[in-house]
């Protein structure tokens, strides 16, 4: 079986989501087991990886300014490949994966792995194409652009423009979109929220992320002060779910309180607006669903570009306090939801629901793919790609 090795890392759900969805697209074309997904940090040093992930989450949630300075420092300094020795275990794990899987190509949704790929290519350990799947928008760290690779798959033209100005060869930039779940394309025209202009009651989805300021207060205000239909997903915070259930008791409008759920794509496609932090995966899934965002938190650095993309396209609002959230929603739903409809139409101009199969087809064929040119699976192996950078 011809395999595509897909690399990810647990420092942000956007990396994992992109890797999973791309793997699913490859397997849909080639077959089960053809796209192994590997987290080199978890594979090489599982205990250190767990500690590092907890530290990362604590930093972005409790000390965002410290994280912002650290993110900027990494962007400006040439840490890699000068200090690549620090990742010697990950380098060894990468080399072992290549020997074991014998892939025809490698795709990475995490930027640091590009330096490992360059090192292995220099010593003959990597002889197949290596691609970056860029999960950020607009605010692009130089870690994405410094390592050579066969190509960069980017989520939108705005990001492609930024990377061209950073010196990335235009012919290697492919603005196919962010690889989202096939669910969005499969339910095109089948799932949508009810028509506000026809008098439907607004349906609001609130995705509560750990560490977001004012989250519980915002949820309580929504429950107490509005007659909108609410769906609130609290993740694994069972205590918060119980408290909100008590606050919602006796509420006449429809209220759904969820814990962890794998139904986010369906929820996004059936609600008028989502309240969420500007995480990479959530933002891109909202775009795919044409569901406008009211952003209640931005992690400095990688998430700044996600909201900037929405701001430039007028596809949502920034509201970092409970008062601001309610005000943004009331303005969106006024006049029969005119502003909400405008936001949703703006989302449509950004959506690329076919990104995952297009990236998969490009990787498997070794050349750019347009929607009309997407090959049949049997034709995907007519070329034997080789590493170039």
Image (cartoon, helix red, strand yellow):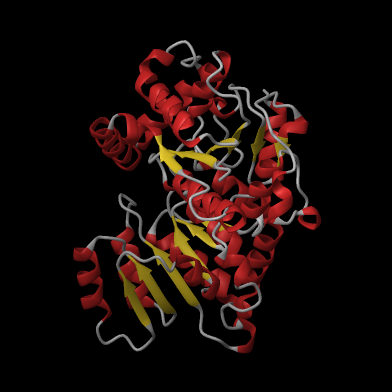
Classify residue 369 as left or right of residue 220. right
Q: Give the x, y percent position of residue 175.
A: 70, 44
Task: From the viewer's side, name the closer residue of 365 and 242.
Answer: 365
Q: Quadrant of residue 236?
A: bottom left
Q: In the image, what residue occupies the spot 25% across and 72% down?
A: 244
Task: From the viewer's side, name the closer residue of 133 and 292.
Answer: 133
Q: Quadrant of the C terminus?
A: top right
Q: Give the x, y percent position of residue 214.
A: 32, 56
Q: Quadrant of residue 46?
A: top left
Task: From the viewer's side, name the closer residue of 102 and 254.
Answer: 102
Relative to 164, residue 227 above or below: below
Q: Give the x, y percent position of residue 130.
A: 60, 31
* Residue 167 seen from this side: yes
* Residue 175 seen from this side: no
Considering every residue shown, the one lying at the far top of the view is: 82
Relative to 321, residue 144 above or below: above
Q: In the image, what residue occupies the spot 74% across and 38% down?
A: 383
Q: In the image, what residue occupies the spot 61% across and 39% down?
A: 138
Q: Give the x, y percent position of residue 289.
A: 58, 65
Q: In the image, what residue occupies the spot 48% across and 77% down?
A: 203
Relative to 288, residue 138 above or below: above
How many callouts does the rendering have?
0
Considering every residue shown, the one lying at the far front of the view is: 1
Task: From the viewer's side, name the closer residue of 302 and 64.
Answer: 302
């Amino acid at each position: 079986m011809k395999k595509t090795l897909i690399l990810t890392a647990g420092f942000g759900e956007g990396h994992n989501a992109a890797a999973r969805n791309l793997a699913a697209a490859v397997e849909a074309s080639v077959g089960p087991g053809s796209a192994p997904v590997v987290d080199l940090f978890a594979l090489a040093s599982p205990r250190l990886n767990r500690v590092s992930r907890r530290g990362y989450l604590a930093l972005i949630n409790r000390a965002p300014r410290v994280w912002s300075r650290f993110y900027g420092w990494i962007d400006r300094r040439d840490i890699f490949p000068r200090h690549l020795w620090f990742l010697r275990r990950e380098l060894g794990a990468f080399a072992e994966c290549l020997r074991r899987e014998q892939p025809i190509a490698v795709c990475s949704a995490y930027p640091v792995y590009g330096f490992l790929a360059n090192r292995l290519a220099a010593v003959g350990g990597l002889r197949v194409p290596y691609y970056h799947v860029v999960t950020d928008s607009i605010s692009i760290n130089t870690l994405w652009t410094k390592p050579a690779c066969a190509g960069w798959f980017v989520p939108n033209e705005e990001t492609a423009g930024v990377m061209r100005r950073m010196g990335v060869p235009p012919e290697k930039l492919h603005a196919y979109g962010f690889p989202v779940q096939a669910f969005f394309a499969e339910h095109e025209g089948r799932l949508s929220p009810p028509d506000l202009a026809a008098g439907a009651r607004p349906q609001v989805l609130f995705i509560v992320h750990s560490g977001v300021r004012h989250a519980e207060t915002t949820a309580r205000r929504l429950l107490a002060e509005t007659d909108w239909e609410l769906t609130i997903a609290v993740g694994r915070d069972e205590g918060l779910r119980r408290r909100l259930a008590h606050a919602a008791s006796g509420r006449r409008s429809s209220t759904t309180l969820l814990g962890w759920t794998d139904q986010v794509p369906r929820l996004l496609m059936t609600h008028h607006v989502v309240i969420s932090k500007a995480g990479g995966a959530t933002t891109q899934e909202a775009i795919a669903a044409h569901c406008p965002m009211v952003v209640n938190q931005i992690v400095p650095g990688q998430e700044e570009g996600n909201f900037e993309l929405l701001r430039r396209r007028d596809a949502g609002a920034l509201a970092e306090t409970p008062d601001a959230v309610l005000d943004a929603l009331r303005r969106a739903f006024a006049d029969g939801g005119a502003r909400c409809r405008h936001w949703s139409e703006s989302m449509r101009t950004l959506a690329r629901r076919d990104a995952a199969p297009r990236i998969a087809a490009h990787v498997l064929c070794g050349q750019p793919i347009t929607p009309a040119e997407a090959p049949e699976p049997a034709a995907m192996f007519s070329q034997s790609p080789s590493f170039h950078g």
